[in-house]
Amino acid sequence: MPEPTELPDRLLFLLERQSCGALGAPAPDGDALQLIFKAALRVPDHLCLRPYNFIVATGEGLDRLGAMMQRAAIAAGKPDDVVQRAIRMPKRAPMVIIIVATPRPHDLVPVFDQQLTAGCAVMAMQMAAQALGFGGIWKSGWFMYDRGLHRDLGLADPDQIVGFLYLGTPQRELPPPPQSEDLDSYVRVL
């Protein structure tokens, strides 16, 4: 295998991808945010159905999202510590983008394929943010499946949250990613 210094920059960028949970201001905005959304529009998408929507929360929008998450936690009967933590969760970064799969009825493209497309959009957006010097982390959890939160966000019945992308400026340097992977544990040949 070639040494990392011999790899094309684009491949090295993928191989060194990491999530960053320690995020502060500033978050991407203006042209940077537009580029992040443009990257999402380039993911694999059979028949170009664009089966996704993005909901951006910053500033007071983070407060509104936290209140929605807290209502969802109360309605779901979550323990008090989860209810109290829910309102603060969006404040872990200056921006949260909620990525929603919005399946379009189609005979050739199943709903699951369209949800995978929306999931690819999350990854593309995180990578674009990182390429622009920002950091991000893709969060999931029970909130993604809570229909009360879906209703609070104005989502339709077939819509499905596929991720919460927290974006901002890294507040600490990340350690280098592991360099040696035991690929035999993940790959088999037929």
Image (tube, helix red, strand yellow):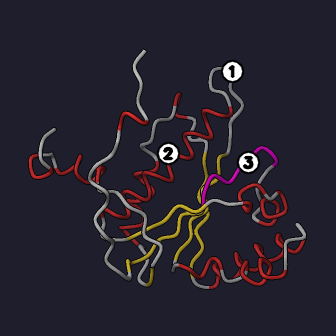
Instruction: Report the quarter where the C terminus lies.
Output: top left
| Circle 3: residue type | Asp
Question: Which badge, 2 or 1, comes first in the chain's sequence?
Answer: 1
Q: Which mark is residue 139?
A: none
| Residue 162 falls within the magenta-colored stretch | yes
| Circle 1: residue type | Asp
Q: Which mark is residue 107?
A: 1
92 left or right of 12? right
Magenta stretch, residue numbers: 157-163
Q: Position of residue 134 (x, y in %)?
A: 36, 71
| Label 3 packing within 10 angstroms: few (<14), some (14-19), many (20+) | some
Residue that mark 2 sits on: 120
**Separation (CA) of disc 2 from disc 1:** 21 Å
| Residue at the spot 58% in from the left edge and 63% down from the top edge | 139
Q: Which mark is residue 159?
A: 3
Dot in front, 2 or 3: 2
Vertically, is 144 above or below 21? above
The quarter of the picture where residue 107 lies is: top right
| Residue at the spot 67% in from the left edge and 83% down from the top edge | 88
| Residue 111 falls within the magenta-colored stretch | no
